[in-house]
Image (cartoon, rainbow, N blue to C red):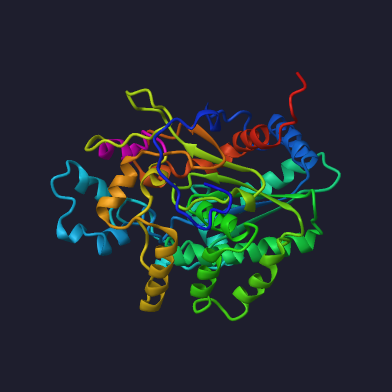
Amino acid sequence: MPTGNNFQHATYPRSDPGDRVAYREFQAGAPPDSPAWLDAMAAHGAQLAQARVRAVLFLHGTHLGTDLFGMQRLDEAGGLKRGYSRGIPGMEALLALMREDSNGVPAFRGGRKPPFNDDEATKKLIDEQAGDAGNFSAAYVDLFTKAVNRNVSQPITCARHLWSSEHHHLGRAQAAVRLITRLRALCVEQKLGAGDRILVQAHGQAGLVLALVSNLLALGKSSGRETMFQILKGHMPAGEIEQLESFLPTGNVLNGAALDVVTFGTPIRYGWDPSGLGKLLHIINHRPMRIDGKQWLAKMELPQITMEMPIAWGGDYVQQLAVAGSDAVPPSEAAKAANKALWELLEPWDGFERWLECARRCTRCANDGMCLLIDYKDSGSTNARDHLYGHAAYTRMNAILSNTTEIVLTLYAPPSTS
């Protein structure tokens, strides 16, 4: 998307991304916490430090108790009750695999639902039930922190941040405001300034929160930012928006530090504004299955897809299907009204037919940033809890080294001297 994107929605191109995309096969390497593994991670930590990455924030939500695919919007407001899906082979079976009550994705014990608070008690409960499936667990972040800081003179600050996991426009917009506040506090605490970098690694829809952040941080005046703030003022505690409004016009929200972003399995939805970020990389669990040679596209054929999804045969189906038109539905009438107002700003598509049109575009790579399509080799199990339809692989403990290797080589490798 262009500089000055002003909250425009991403497009769904089917053309080859060219040199913006690269293809990989997952290589776990040495076992986590083994001497060889620690040595490799320490070398990456040294490169991060040399690039002046001073902090790494792991941003995640949870699949527990959430509408992972966004079927509520399709069911309640998208026309399915009027029979739009009839006559499309395999569609009813596909929708059953996406619905909360029939997709096999576990509920939160005790029936807890979003919004979730970023507190240690909640994150501990998520760790106990989800482990490292679609979750940057405490064990993941602790091991990463220990490993990258072995041979650096100034330790890299590492932390995790749980966003509310409200999979709708209002929830993501509120999360974006709160994330900027968290990042600004981090800059103050660590005395970050010009030349320093913050790296945020975001899983799933947390990446959409970062897309909104990029638009909020964009330089210059923004009619979209003003509209978003006006909508949010009635749904956030007094002072949260006003405080941010006072910082944004200065263009120095992060004290001059650069914000680098890596997303894992983030659906194509909101557009990115490159002027609000430093470096940008998208990583997607993807297995080329098409017979037309377009290996950069996902496969979307019915009814075959309903036989592939239960074993995650084609990669990350959440990234592929939780596109424009899908979403959870806010619980109150006031929140629904605010969500609709934000939808008019952020997303031009709505309804079952438009969602299906977007999904059938099979777009894997976002419009901006580098894109790595990696076969995480996680297919095979018939239990959705094991793979979350291809969405769980990124945060596994055995992926720490591979993920870090790809990030360092793509974003922070020193320039070639040849």
Is 292 within the magenta? no
Relative to 1, 276 lies left or right: right
Question: Residue drawn at (52%, 54%), measured in percent from left and top?
Answer: 206
Q: Nearer the viewer, residue 119 or 181?
A: 181
Image location (x, y in percent) of residue 62: 48, 56
379 over 52 or under it: above or below: above
Is 308 within the magenta? yes
351 over 366 or under it: above or below: below
Secondary structure mostly seen in magenta is: helix
**Magenta range:** 305-315
Relative to 396, 188 lies left or right: right
106 over 223 or under it: above or below: above
Q: Nearer the viewer, residue 114 or 9?
A: 9
- Direction right: furthest residue: 153
- Direction left: furthest residue: 87
- Tag count in the figure? 0
Q: Nearer the viewer, residue 68 or 399?
A: 68
Question: Residue drawn at (62%, 57%), measured in percent from left and top?
Answer: 218
Q: Is residue 239 visible?
A: yes
Task: Classify the position of the C terminus by image quarter.
Answer: top right
Image location (x, y in percent) of residue 29: 61, 28
- Direction top: furthest residue: 418
Question: Residue drawn at (51%, 73%), measured in percent from left and top?
Answer: 232
Relative to 193, 325 lies left or right: left
Image location (x, y in percent) of residue 121: 58, 66
Image location (x, y in percent) of residue 155: 80, 48
Q: Is residue 25 visible?
A: no
